[in-house]
Image (cartoon, rainbow, N blue to C red):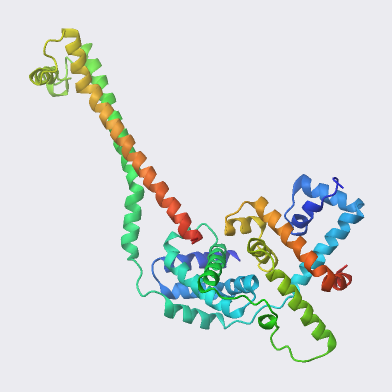
């Protein structure tokens, strides 16, 4: 009995079997009277169900007219919805653009500082050079707020470099990541809600 | 649905989403029969079918902004229809016809014996279908009367294809058992 294909007869009847499974069922049906009889009874049942007469309803036009009378008069302004929708999808695009711009800027800044240190910028205008004076100003500012007070020169230099270059990068990267994750969380919530709306359950 | 009709329907959905009631009215005309048929086959009562179908289209209008155009509108409507009819029956505590009163065929005039016999059989089949569990009946109706594929049924009812197959197997098995002693044996001879 375990070799029978009874469980596949319904999908076979409905044309839902393909490939090797279809071949297996067809081969088995050629040689098994019991499965052929079961298939015949399923065909009979299906034909019998089809014979049940359909109900008579009012014409679709009349039905549609009744529906229109019951429709709420005004829906939410579609143009405003579309603008909000476009704006919503622009958020991750804008975040990506900011992220690319920020990383490019930091990369160029690092390249310029390296070029300045090895003396490649000596022949260019002052405004294009890596401005050492701003580093000094930054150190002075750190000194004023007490960050460098009492520390060694090496530590002071590290603190200056970290607070002036690495820290802003970290803050910006984390901020963008948090914004993107928040957007993803909201999108997921909306998506779930939409699924529930479509199912209209509960 | 032909590709021209599909394009037309996509256009109608787009316009209806923008608030055009005329476009929505055309969509109602296209799908009214199918939606009412599904509910009728599910619950065997024309009045319930009419009322639940109206509720279905009202709900569809209200939730149209959340409808994804790349999916099937017909299947979406069928899903709403089945849920709307179930909710309606539960909330209003309507009693489904458990006698043959509401299930008699229309215009069943006393006629030749063969016609009377056929009508009696059809009524028994209908009663047997209505006695199936809701979940199985929905799958059976969508397959037998609306001709949906297993995948379409799965999408409509939000269940796996494997579940569609098992529910359909179970529904047909139950139907055969219910009908075997009455009309099925006699009919088998006609089709085999």
| Residue B48 image point, x, y percent | 57, 77
Q: Residue furthest bottom?
A: B110
Judged left or right of residue A37, residue B87 is: left
Judged left or right of residue B108, residue A27 is: right
* Residue B91 in the image: above or below residue A151: below
| Residue A132 image point, x, y percent | 14, 17
| Residue A36 image point, x, y percent | 87, 57
Residue at position x 42%, y 47% from top? A188
| Residue A194 image point, x, y percent | 44, 56
Of residues A20 and B62, the one drawn nearer to the viewer in this rendering:
B62
Residue at position x 65%, y 79% from top? A55
Residue at position x 49%, y 62% from top? A200
Of residues A43 and A77, the one drawn nearer to the viewer in this rendering:
A43
Residue at position x 44%, y 64% from top? B63
* Figure label count: 0
Residue A140, visible in the rendered structure: yes
Residue A101, visible in the rendered structure: no
């Amino acid at each position: 009995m375990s070799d029978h294909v009874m469980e596949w007869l319904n999908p076979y009847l409905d044309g839902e079997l393909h490939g090797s499974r279809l071949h297996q069922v067809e081969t088995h049906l050629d040689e098994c009277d019991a499965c052929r009889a079961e298939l015949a009874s399923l065909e009979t049942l299906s034909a019998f169900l089809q014979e049940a007469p359909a109900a008579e309803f009012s014409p679709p036009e009349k039905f549609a007219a009744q529906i229109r009378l019951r429709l709420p008069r005004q829906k939410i302004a579609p143009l405003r919805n579309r603008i909000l929708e476009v704006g919503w999808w622009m958020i991750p695009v804008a975040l990506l653009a900011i992220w690319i711009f920020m990383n490019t800027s930091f990369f160029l800044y690092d390249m310029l500082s390296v070029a300045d240190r090895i003396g490649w910028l000596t022949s260019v205008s002052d405004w294009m050079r890596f401005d050492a004076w701003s580093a000094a100003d930054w150190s002075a500012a750190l000194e004023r707020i007490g960050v460098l007070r009492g520390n060694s020169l090496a530590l002071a230099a590290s603190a200056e470099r970290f607070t002036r270059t690495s820290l802003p990068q970290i803050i910006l990267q984390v901020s963008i990541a948090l914004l993107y994750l928040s957007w993803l969380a909201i999108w997921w919530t909306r998506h779930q809600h939409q699924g529930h709306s479509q199912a209209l359950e509960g | 649905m032909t590709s021209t009709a599909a394009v037309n329907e996509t256009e109608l959905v787009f316009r209806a989403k923008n608030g055009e009631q005329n476009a929505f009215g055309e969509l109602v005309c296209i799908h009214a029969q199918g939606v009412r048929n599904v509910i009728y086959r599910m619950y065997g009562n024309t009045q319930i079918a009419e009322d639940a179908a109206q509720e279905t289209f009202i709900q569809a209008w209200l939730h149209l902004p959340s409808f994804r155009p790349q999916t099937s509108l017909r299947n979406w409507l069928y899903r709403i229809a089945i849920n709307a009819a179930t909710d309606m029956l539960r909330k209003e505590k309507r009693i489904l016809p458990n006698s043959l009163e509401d299930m008699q065929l229309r215009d069943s005039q006393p006629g030749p014996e063969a016609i009377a016999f056929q009508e009696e059989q059809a009524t028994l089949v209908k009663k047997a279908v209505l006695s199936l569990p809701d979940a199985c009946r929905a799958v059976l109706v969508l397959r037998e009367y609306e001709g949906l594929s297993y995948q379409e049924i799965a999408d409509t009812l939000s269940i796996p294809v494997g579940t569609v197959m098992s529910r359909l197997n179970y529904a047909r098995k139950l139907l055969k058992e219910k009908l075997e002693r009455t009309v099925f044996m006699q009919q088998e001879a006609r089709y085999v």
